[in-house]
């Protein structure tokens, strides 16, 4: 949405080590079968005895972990999951998934092992390691979801030295919000966040432990929501929402500067630096390395590129795709177009800041040079488009131009995608359920869109309604100060109660 101005370790407690296959009671399609274990879990450390140190191993999902004859944590029980070693001992752990599961990666003191089946830890202190196994269940062909707002923000909304403050710079999202969506049959969420809060300086590590603790807290809050949603079987699209210098929708920018341009942005040491494409690639490489073990997570490269070069944007998108795949991550990547990602403008050129101007269609087909389209070695990329049904398609108003407006807009992108063997994800759609219309109702317009979605399963991957969030932060059901079209629960204490917008759309999430 181009006119919106937004309201203002992976670390969780662990279960007792080796609690057997009871850990796999949920689907685990997000890379972990319970919400009590995650990458980088913070786990209890056992006490030392003399010069011996204790290795404590835990597991999510179904699989076996062994270290020769000294330690064995099996899918059916424990024998045992802790062992003591003399100081300086090098211990190699081996992960073996059971049938129907895949090993996704190590955490804790074994995190350096990544997704390798073996990890080595030196016992110079008490150590804790976790292993994650995920169930081999593909996500549904089509998905229907909502956007979760709140963790996106202007880069000047907080002191860069101390970082974003939870509960002030952004809301601390309660997992009861996910429970509310699940009760409606919603199968996906698009979770927006801020690049600068992940990397306050370009090329910083993720998670950022070297800077102020607020940055690690921000990261942990994002991961907490992702873990909870994926554990419950939801798909989660993680996507950075970037601000421009006015705190509006900035698109492909970092601290207001366009990716790949010669413009400079101030760093923490006040020396101006450019924002090269390889910085964008570095960001996505580090994010993908963290999330590649989450089969229910997909990547949206950035929210609504705009006021920038179409050619430069698609070259930056290619750099990010290549970086993601180089980590071994196989999940789907959603690539938005320039021009606020407008579905009706996919083949238009007016939004391009270059001369001669080119369309998103042209940018995609020539991203790697003339006649060389955007390339993914896994062929698992898709177009992300957005649409609104007011007169300027910004979502900043409550008018609905026609009963077929949404369908008419999306059809432009969908027809082109189908002709080129591509798929489309509608990342944003929303309008006011009580809008004043002539000759039709907002419910009629929604039904027309859903009918179009249902009739195009081969090309139309999914949609996410704009928007929802913390009930006290995101509650406007209309377009007061920008399009909000809230489907947040109306009761912020119980996380119950439906807005008029949720009442209009909720039946179209059930049983899918």
Image: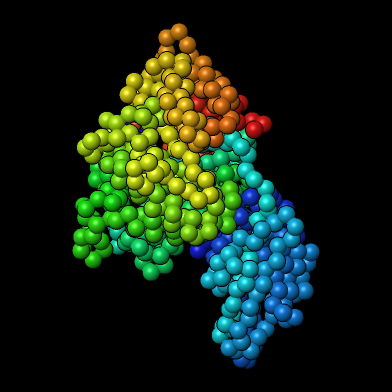
Q: Residue furthest front?
A: 371
The residue under the point 56% across, 21% down is: 451
- Where, quadrant-wise, is the C terminus in this rendering? top right
- Residue 14, image x, y percentages: 62, 64
On the picture, is 95 further left or further right than 428?
A: right
| Vertical placement of residue 277 versus 505, above or below | below
- Whether residue 267 is visible, yes or no, is yes
Q: Quadrant of the N terminus?
A: top left
What colour scheme has been applied to the protein in the rendered image?
A: rainbow
Q: Quadrant of residue 150?
A: top left
Quarter of the image where one finds residue 410: top left
Left or right, 14 with reference to 145: right
Using residue 34 as the reference point, say whether residue 431 is left or right of it: left
The quarter of the picture where residue 453 lies is top right
Q: Residue at x 42, y 44 (%)?
A: 374
Rendering coords of residue 309 (x, y %): 27, 42
Residue located at (40% from left, 49% from top): 318
Q: Nearer the viewer, residue 118 or 211?
A: 118
Count of numbered tags: 0
Q: Residue at x 65, y 61 (%)?
A: 103
Return the residue nearer the eye: 289 or 478.
Answer: 289
Residue lying at the far bottom in this picture: please name it. 50
Percent x, y of residue 122: 57, 82
Q: Position of residue 495 (x, y in %)?
A: 56, 39
329 vs 499: above or below: below
In the rendered view, tell whether residue 343 sits above or below residue 320: above
Residue 388: tell me if it is visible: no
The residue nearer to you, when weighing 229 against 406, is 406
């Amino acid at each position: 949405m181009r006119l919106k101005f937004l309201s203002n370790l992976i670390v969780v407690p662990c279960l007792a080590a080796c609690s057997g296959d009871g850990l796999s009671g949920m689907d685990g399609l997000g890379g972990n079968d319970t919400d009590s274990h995650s990458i980088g879990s913070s786990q209890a450390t056992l006490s030392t005895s003399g010069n011996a140190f204790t290795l404590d191993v835990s597991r999510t999902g179904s699989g076996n972990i062994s270290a020769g004859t000294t330690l064995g944590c099996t899918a059916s029980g424990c024998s045992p999951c802790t062992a003591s070693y003399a100081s300086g001992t090098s211990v190699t752990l081996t992960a073996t998934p059971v049938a129907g599961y895949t090993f996704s990666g190590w955490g804790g003191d074994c995190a350096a092992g990544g997704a390798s089946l073996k990890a080595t830890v030196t016992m110079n202190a008490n150590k804790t390691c976790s292993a994650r196994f995920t169930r081999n269940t593909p996500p549904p062909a089509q998905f229907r979801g909502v956007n979760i707002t709140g963790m996106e923000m202007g880069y000047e909304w907080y002191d860069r030295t101390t970082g974003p403050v939870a509960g002030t710079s952004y809301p601390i999202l309660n997992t009861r919000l996910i429970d509310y969506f699940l009760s409606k049959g919603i199968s996906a969420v698009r979770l927006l966040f801020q690049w600068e809060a992940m990397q306050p300086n370009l090329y910083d590590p993720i998670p950022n432990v070297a800077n102020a603790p607020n940055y690690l807290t921000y990261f942990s809050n994002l991961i907490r929501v992702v873990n909870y949603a994926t554990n419950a079987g939801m798909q989660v699209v993680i996507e950075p929402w970037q601000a421009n210098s006015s705190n509006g929708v900035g698109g492909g920018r970092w601290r207001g500067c366009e990716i790949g341009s010669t413009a400079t942005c101030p760093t923490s040491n006040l020396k101006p630096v450019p924002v090269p494409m390889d910085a964008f690639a570095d960001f996505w490489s580090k994010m993908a390395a963290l999330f590649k073990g989450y089969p229910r997570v997909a990547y949206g490269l950035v929210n609504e590129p705009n006021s920038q070069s179409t050619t430069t944007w698609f070259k930056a998108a290619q750099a990010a795709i290549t970086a993601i795949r180089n980590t071994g991550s196989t999940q789907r990547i959603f690539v938005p177009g320039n021009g606020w990602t407008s579905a009706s403008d996919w083949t238009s050129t007016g939004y391009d800041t270059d001369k001669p101007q080119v369309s998103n269609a042209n940018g995609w087909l020539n991203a790697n040079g003339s006649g060389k389209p955007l390339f993914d070695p896994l062929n698992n990329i898709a177009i992300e488009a957005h649409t609104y049904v007011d007169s300027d398609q910004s979502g900043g108003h409550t008018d609905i131009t026609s009963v077929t407006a949404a369908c008419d807009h999306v059809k432009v992108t969908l027809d082109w995608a189908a002709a080129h063997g591509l798929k489309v994800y509608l990342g944003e759609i929303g309008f006011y359920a009580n809008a004043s219309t002539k000759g039709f109702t907002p419910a009629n317009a929604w039904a027309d869109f859903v009918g179009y979605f249902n009739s195009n399963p081969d090309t139309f991957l999914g949609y996410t309604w704009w928007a929802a969030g913390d009930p006290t932060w995101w509650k406007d059901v209309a377009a007061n100060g920008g399009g909000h079209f809230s489907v947040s629960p109306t009761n912020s204490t119980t996380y119950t109660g439906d807005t008029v917008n949720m009442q209009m759309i909720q039946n179209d999430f059930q049983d899918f």
